[in-house]
Image (tube, rainbow, N blue to C red):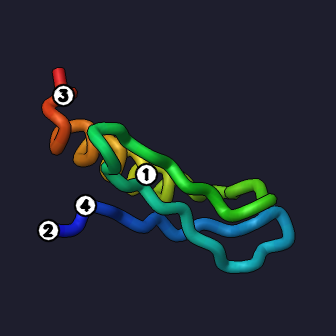
Amino acid sequence: MSEPRWWVDCLDPFGRDRSMTVLVEHGRVVLVAPPGQTAVLSPQQTRRLHHALDRAAGDLGLSE
């Protein structure tokens, strides 16, 4: 079975489409941002990132 993962769309500072990945690997939550870039998120994309991180933590039993 593959590890859980989620993608969150975002932009780089130049307005180009990018994405961030949230995954669970070896019992840890990993956030992979665009390589060498800054991720620019709208309020809706920020909520999606929050949801993805929350689900990843829940998969590990880290939710409060």
Q: Which residue is mark 2?
A: 1
Q: Earlier in the sequence, mark 3 or mark 2?
A: 2
Whole-percent x, y for residue 15 in the image: 78, 74
Q: With respect to residue 20, does 46 lie above or below?
A: above
Percent across and percent down for residue 61 are 14, 31
Foreground disc of the pair 4, 3: 4
Q: Residue at x 23, y 47 (%)?
A: 55
Tell me residue 63's x, y (percent). 18, 28
Label 3 and label 1: CA atoms lie apart by: 16 Å
In which quadrant is the C terminus drawn? Answer: top left
Mark 1 or 2: in front is: 2
Residue matched to label 3: 63
Helix, strand or loop at label 1? It is helix
Pointer 2 local density, CA inside 10 Å: few below 14, some 14–19, many at least 20: few
* Farthest-out residue, bottom: 17
- Type of amino acid under label 2: Met
Q: Are marks 3 and 1 in contact (CB under 8 Å)?
A: no
Of the residues tagged 4 and 1, which is closer to the observer?
A: 4
Question: Which residue occupies 35% across, 38% down?
Answer: 28
- For the residue marked with disc 1, what is the amino acid? Leu
**From the viewer's perspective, is residue 63 above or below residue 30?**
above
- Judge the density around disc 4: few (<14), some (14-19), many (≥20) Cα neighbours within 10 Å: few
- Nearest to the eye among marks 3 and 2: give it: 2
Precedes in sequence: disc 4 or disc 3: 4
Q: Residue drawn at (45%, 46%), measured in percent from left and top?
A: 30
Going from the N terminus, do you reach mark 1 or mark 2 first?
2
